[in-house]
Amino acid sequence: MSGHELALQKALVARLTADAAVHALVGGRIFDLAPEGAETAHLLIGRGESRPVAADGCGMEHQVTLTAVSRFRGSEEAKAVLAAVRAALEGAHQEGIGLEADGVRTVSLSVRFADVFPASDGRRVFAVMRIRAVTEEV
């Protein structure tokens, strides 16, 4: 993992952990690999793709998958986590703050895709979202 990918993950975790609405739903349960028997609801930082941006500053474009996991009956909790995460991430850029960690900051960030569906075991509901971020060195 290059510096941009790890820095983006750290910045995502910091922003989501600090957000009151996200915290109310998932607490500090934001993982890149959930521990065995993890409480729900929780949020997983999953697959990530990145590629250089052909521009000054040697930026990187990222596609990162976030998955909310809920055991609440129905999709209400998963959708609430999705909405809170979207607001926290997009709000950072609307406020002009962006995300920053380890000398890397986001230039843009948005949720590009979301899907809410029940797991095949019928006991969990997933809210999968794909975010796009462009990072540059500070």
Image: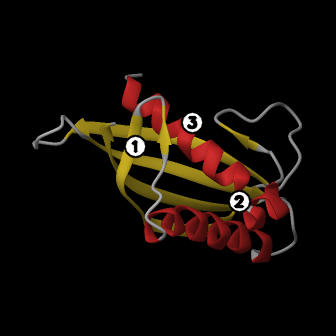
Q: Which mark is residue 18?
A: none
Residue 56 screen position, x and y as percent: 11, 41
- Answer few, some or many: residues within 10 Å of disc 2's Cα (few below 14, many 20 plus, some between 14 and 19): some
- Answer few, some or many: residues within 10 Å of disc 3's Cα (few below 14, many 20 plus, some between 14 and 19): some
- Tag 2 secondary structure: loop
Residue 35 screen position, x and y as percent: 80, 31
The reply to whether the C-beta atoms of the residues labelled 3 and 2 are less than 8 Å apart is no
- Answer few, some or many: residues within 10 Å of disc 1's Cα (few below 14, many 20 plus, some between 14 and 19): many
Which residue lies under the disc numbered 2? 19
Which residue lies under the disc numbered 3? 10
Which residue lies under the disc numbered 1? 105
Which quadrant of the view contains residue 25? bottom right
What is the number of callouts on the image?
Answer: 3
Q: CA distance from mark 1 to mark 2?
A: 18 Å
Q: Looking at the picture, which amino acid does disc 3 mark?
A: Lys
| Side (left or right) of 59 relative to 66 | left
Depth check: 62 or 18 in front? 18
